[in-house]
Image: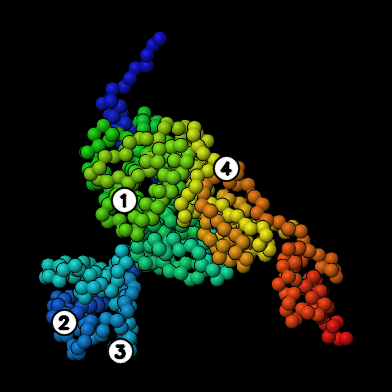
């Protein structure tokens, strides 16, 4: 029997390196769709804030050619040379805004409200504390001359007209933030390191000028209402597909996708290659604006397309809020992979000084589908491919609280089929029975937002995080509760459920308005017949 020839490790690595270089050229040739542009304007109006009048005055004198004004935080009065000056206790100062549109408000004094293009905060306790500070706001750690000169130099460069990308797209129609006065999902608000997202009770609002493209909002969004758009997930996945297809066609083996942000980018990847040794040829870099802009649906699709692992290059510049979101996504992805019988560490952080990820996933037949559609469609397409090729998959995996997949159950004795839950469900996971009194549930659509539990007047519904791996079971409507229709005793039309009418009669039995048998009987009439009966009673 002839034995297959083995390829020496050195030759295999050389082949992989050539395949990687070819794959990078192929992916680089793909043109992503452009995003919208926001224009910002700065005329150089500068606000200098500080508790030390001498330090503030020094900054004002050195600010030329900027147009400075000064705010001294603390007691006192008088003007600094060369600048309009206000004095105010710290707790009476409000500052917000962005490059070209900062707003200062002083409670009960001074200008009341003033606008500035730039802010130099020398107070020692910065007024703006979000992890990603808006462009045009600087708060040096040190009050020394070198730090002050560096800050003023940076601010001078921020005079003129500027363009910034609109990093996001928002679809309020599928947002799970709130409905009918109830508020549920706050993932994007809590994730945003720039403080750019605020609640409008039943939807959210994004201030595009504050958004700096951290990406955690889109990654954490369970429905896809908040989407990253610089570039879109579909464009990034097409880049991933081309990387892997080209690598495979060029003879490469065991591809590992390494996601890294463009700022750290080339230099960081070159350092990793230098330290990777024989693993270097496996690494396929995907440069993105921010590592957190790609989430679970992209990672699982990359594995379905043939990546043997996905690594995320860590960086000290990743805000803690963003890191928390990515860690949650990694935990969720690992739980799903474990439930499918695959190695959980196929998804992991990668540190520049640490070993690169090994190709730990088994060699699967790569998926050929195009990653199109909504966020959950993309994710489920990848999941179905991985499930179909799994040898030891469980029927389902139980997930931790907060996971965006799960089931709903109903206490049939308590449920009146009022359909309050159906009216607030953002994903249409809860559905009514059309012409019959039924409540149905479609698990594939449930994002576990909790709007149904908050809206149920009977506290009859609860949710449990889990993920069904079987696509048919996940996409098949399941009956949660049903009842017989109650027909109006006068006209015969169905207007409520039997259990609801019975519960109303029971609850109102002792009420003074319903002690009269005729009044009590009206509970069994539809709305029109009830009004007609009341009018007849008044005429008698």
Asked which quadrant contains residue 520, the reply is: bottom right
Looking at the rendered structure, which numbered label has been put on residue 335?
A: none
Mark 1 Cα shell of 10 Å, populated few (<14), some (14-19), many (≥20): many
Q: Closer to the observer: label 1 or label 2?
A: 2
Of label 2 and label 3, which has the lower sequence position?
2
Q: Which percent across, then down, holds residue 301?
A: 45, 43
Q: Point out the frontmost of discs 4 and 2.
A: 4
What distance separates the C-alpha of mark 4 from that of mark 2? 67 Å
Q: Which badge, 4 or 1, is on the more N-terminal residue?
A: 1
Q: Earlier in the sequence, mark 1 or mark 3?
A: 3
Q: Which residue is drawn at 52% across and 35% down?
A: 388
Q: Position of residue 418 (x, y in %)?
A: 67, 65
Local packing at callout 2 (Cα closer than 10 Å; few below 14, some 14-19, many 20+) is some
Q: Which residue in the protein does label 1 denote?
A: 261
Mark 3 Cα within 10 Å, few/some/many (few <14, many 20+)?
Answer: few
Residue beneath disc 3 = 109
The span from disc 1 to disc 3 (Cα, nearest Å) is: 46 Å
């Amino acid at each position: 029997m002839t034995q297959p020839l083995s390829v020496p490790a050195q030759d295999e690595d050389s082949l992989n390196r050539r395949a990687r270089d070819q794959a990078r050229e192929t992916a680089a040739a793909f043109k992503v769709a452009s995003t919208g542009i926001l224009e910002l304007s700065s005329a150089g109006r500068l606000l200098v804030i500080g508790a030390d009048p001498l330090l503030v005055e020094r900054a004002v004198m050195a600010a030329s050619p900027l147009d400075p004004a000064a705010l001294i935080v603390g007691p006192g009065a008088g003007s600094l040379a060369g600048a309009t000056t206000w004095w105010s206790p710290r707790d009476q100062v409000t500052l917000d805004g962005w490059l070209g549109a900062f707003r200062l408000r002083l409670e009960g004094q001074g200008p009341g409200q003033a606008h500035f293009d730039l802010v130099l905060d020398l107070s020692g306790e910065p007024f703006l504390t979000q992890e990603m500070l808006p462009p045009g706001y600087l708060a040096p750690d040190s009050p020394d001359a070198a730090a002050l000169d560096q800050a003023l130099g940076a601010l001078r460069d921020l005079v003129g007209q500027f363009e910034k990308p609109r990093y996001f797209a928002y679809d309020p129609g599928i947002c799970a933030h709130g409905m009918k006065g109830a508020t549920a999902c706050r993932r994007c608000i809590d994730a945003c390191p720039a403080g750019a997202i605020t609640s409008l009770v039943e939807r959210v609002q994004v201030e595009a000028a504050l958004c700096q493209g951290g990406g955690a909002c889109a990654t954490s969004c369970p429905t896809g209402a908040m989407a990253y758009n610089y570039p879109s997930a579909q464009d990034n996945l097409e880049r991933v597909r081309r990387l892997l297809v080209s690598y495979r066609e060029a003879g490469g083996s065991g591809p590992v996708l390494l996601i890294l942000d463009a700022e750290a980018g080339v230099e960081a990847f070159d350092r990793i290659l230098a330290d990777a040794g024989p693993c270097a040829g496996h690494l396929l870099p995907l440069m993105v604006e921010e590592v957190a802009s790609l989430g679970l649906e992209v990672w699982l699709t990359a594995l379905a397309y043939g990546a043997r692992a996905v690594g995320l290059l860590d960086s000290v510049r990743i805000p803690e809020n963003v890191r928390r979101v990515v860690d949650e996504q990694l935990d969720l992805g690992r739980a799903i992979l474990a439930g499918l019988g695959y190695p959980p560490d196929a998804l992991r952080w990668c540190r520049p000084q640490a070993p690169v990820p090994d190709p730990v996933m088994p060699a699967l037949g790569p998926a050929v589908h195009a990653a199109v559609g909504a966020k959950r469609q993309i994710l489920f397409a990848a999941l179905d491919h991985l499930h179909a090729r799994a040898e030891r998959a469980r029927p389902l995996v139980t997930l931790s609280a907060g996971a965006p997949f799960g089931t709903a159950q109903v206490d049939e004795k308590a449920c009146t089929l009022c359909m309050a839950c159906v009216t607030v469900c953002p994903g249409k996971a809860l559905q009514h029975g059309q012409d019959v009194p039924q409540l149905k549930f479609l698990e594939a659509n449930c994002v576990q937002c909790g709007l149904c539990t908050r809206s149920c007047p009977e506290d009859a519904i609860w949710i449990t995080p889990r993920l069904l791996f079987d696509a048919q079971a996940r996409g098949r409507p399941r009956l949660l509760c049903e009842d017989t229709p109650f027909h109006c005793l006068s006209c015969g039309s169905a207007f409520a459920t039997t259990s609801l009418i019975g519960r109303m009669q029971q609850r109102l039995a002792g009420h003074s308005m319903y002690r009269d048998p005729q009044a009590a009987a009206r509970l069994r009439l539809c709305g029109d017949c009830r009004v007609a009966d009341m009018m007849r009673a008044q005429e008698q």
